[in-house]
Image: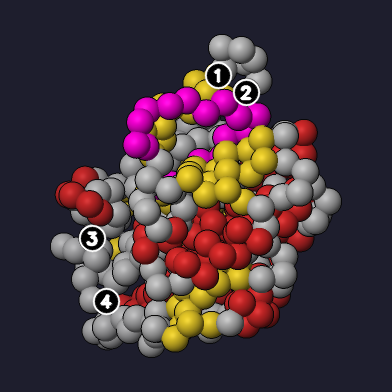
Amino acid sequence: MAKTVVILGGAFAGLHVAHALLKKRDAGLKVILVSKNSHFYWNIASVRAIVPGIYKDEEIFKPISEALSRYPETSYELVVGTAEAADFEAKTVSVTTASSSEPRSISYDQLLLATGSRTAVTGVPWKAAGSYEEAVALLHATAEKAEAASHIVVAGAGSTGVEVAGELGFAWGKTKEIVLLCAEDKLLGGDIVSSAAANELKKLNVRVEYGTRVEDTKPSESDAKKTDITVSSTEAKTITTDLYLPTFGLVPNSEFIDAKYLEDGARKGLVAVDEFLRVKDTTNVWAAGDLVSNPRAGFMITQKQAAAVAKNIELALAGKPPLAAKGMPVDILAVSTGRSRGAGRMGSFRMPSFGVWLAKGRQLGLNMFPSYLDGSVA
Ligand SMILES: Cc1cc2nc3c(=O)[nH]c(=O)nc-3n(C[C@H](O)[C@H](O)[C@H](O)COP(=O)(O)OP(=O)(O)OC[C@H]3O[C@@H](n4cnc5c(N)ncnc54)[C@H](O)[C@@H]3O)c2cc1C
């Protein structure tokens, strides 16, 4: 009898698994991919896309329908909609779409949760929280504001914050004031490449304020287009800026999942999985990518997990036991700092700035985008 695999989320994890299953062309298999966003957003390039004129929209947003159109129409269905509820006992998910006022209930044999994460503070384009149209509009609006601003504050000095500050410094370090607020006394949570990243940002005229944590933000009293940022550092103070770009915090898109399948504490809201990436206490529900964030959120980690989950779904469909998912052989941190340099390491080996640029900063992974679309990555 035909089996149905439902995949929730159509980005790095979800599309990868869809390709892996569809490439096998098992005639008895139907893949239903549900994605809030009709397009796959290469959000890794968003840090540079906020500088106008560098990328065309169609370079960083690609239709999921085109990626799937290479498979027989009967083997898959793309549903542009939002998973609102999942019943792991009844093996159904409830999905709302723009074309219907009633939610659609979709039954599955195997389910993949790949709905990723969104930014903790809304209004920044680092992830696609809503539809394709909303994501494009937000990216354009941010780029326009960045171009018009004389003073920009980037808050949060993790990889995204350092990369955003680097891009702004590269584009406008000589003509605008670019400030990076770092809550700790080192960038990148004190990683061994923190001082290399700090040196790179200095060259780009980015001013880093260490030990400075954002406490509150509101439209400025002097000019509602500006933002007043209350920060705590050695003393509380207010910074008024033309553009405030928070980069800290990711929230898992897991509201539609029963809390008993989610983690608590520091990993609150992430999906709890076993060594097979199977959701704990289930037999046929799997999860991968930022929704799991183990050991952390990263697209290379996501890619590894997607490959493991695809294999395990295949095994489950064949009535065979799953295999343990293997992690990355070496932990890589590569942080782009503008369009010509970077800071990074492979394991504990520091990479030269040029090497980080070559491996990452030159294209911000866009060279890999075609393989996600044509399925060769899977
Ligand atoms: C600015 C930035 C730069 C980054 N750079 C790097 C990097 O250089 N290297 C690296 O390794 N990692 C990087 N990352 C991390 C990388 O982006 C993530 O690890 C990756 O996006 C995870 O992919 P995912 O498929 O799990 O989830 P996501 O990319 O979050 O995709 C989830 C998908 O699910 C959809 N969705 C959400 N909720 C629902 C729902 N209820 N129903 C249906 N669909 C839904 C969303 O619309 C989205 O399409 C970066 C992240 C950011 C923010």
Q: Which mark is residue 276?
A: 4
Dot 2 surroundings within 10 Å: few (below 14), some, or many (20 or more)?
some
The answer to whether residue 361 shows anywhere in this view is yes
Q: Amino acid at mark 4?
A: Phe
Q: In the image, is 262 to the left or to the right of 307?
A: left
Element type at mark 4: loop
Residue tagged by mark 1? Answer: 219
Q: Nearer the viewer, residue 134 or 85?
A: 134
Start-end of magenta stretch = 233-249
Q: Does the beta carbon of the residue at mark 2 sit less than 8 Å from ligand 1? A: no
> Residue shown at 56%/12% (left/top)?
221
Q: Does the beta carbon of the residue at mark 3 sit less than 8 Å from ligand 1? A: no
Q: Which one is closest to the eye, mark 4 or mark 1?
A: 1
Q: Nearer the viewer, residue 263 or 341?
A: 341
Q: Which mark is residue 272?
A: 3
Nearer-N-terminus badge (2/3) = 2
Dot 3 surroundings within 10 Å: few (below 14), some, or many (20 or more)?
many
Q: Report, in whole angstroms, how far the alpha carbon at label 2 lies from the one at label 1.
A: 6 Å
